[in-house]
Amino acid sequence: MSDEQLKRVAAKGGLIGIGFWKVATCGKDAAAVARAIAHAVKVMGVRHVALGSDFDGAVGQPFDAAGFPLITEALMKEGLSAADIKLVMGGNALRFLSERLPAK
């Protein structure tokens, strides 16, 4: 997505899940995923960025869920704070869904 598209999603309160595959991250490792996440955070703000692993098998992934610590470490190297990493690694998705799904 372009930076302009990211900004429009954020302006409407949306959430972008960053995929782990090469076309989405321009790389094949956790460092590439972290760079893509850090860029999206810079453009649209941390509250609008989440993981978008796409583990459904439709596209190849460089690692499975066991690689999440690699992403966390790479995000630290990108300069994200512990609080921001917590949001990206699941906090934003939980908040977004809890705000939008109907209550029982």
Image: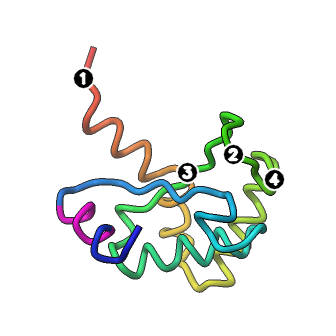
Residue 47 is situated, as x and y percent measured from the top left of the image, at 35, 63
The residue at the point 41 percent across, 81 percent down is: 42
Q: What is the C-alpha distance between the residues marked 4 and 3? A: 13 Å
Q: Which residue is mark 4?
A: 63
Q: Which residue is mark 3?
A: 52
The first of marks 2 and 1 along the sequence is: 2
Element type where label 3 sits in the image: loop
Q: Amino acid at mark 3?
A: Gly
Chain part drawn in magenta? 6-11
Q: Which residue is mark 1?
A: 102
- Looking at this view, is 92 or 35 the one in front? 35
Residue 92 is situated, as x and y percent measured from the top left of the image, at 42, 53
The first of marks 3 and 2 along the sequence is: 3
Query: What is the total number of numbered labels drawn onto the structure image?
Result: 4
The first of marks 1 and 4 along the sequence is: 4
* Mark 4 touches mark 3? (CB < 8 Å): no
Q: What is the C-alpha distance between the residues marked 3 and 2? A: 12 Å
Element type where label 2 sits in the image: loop
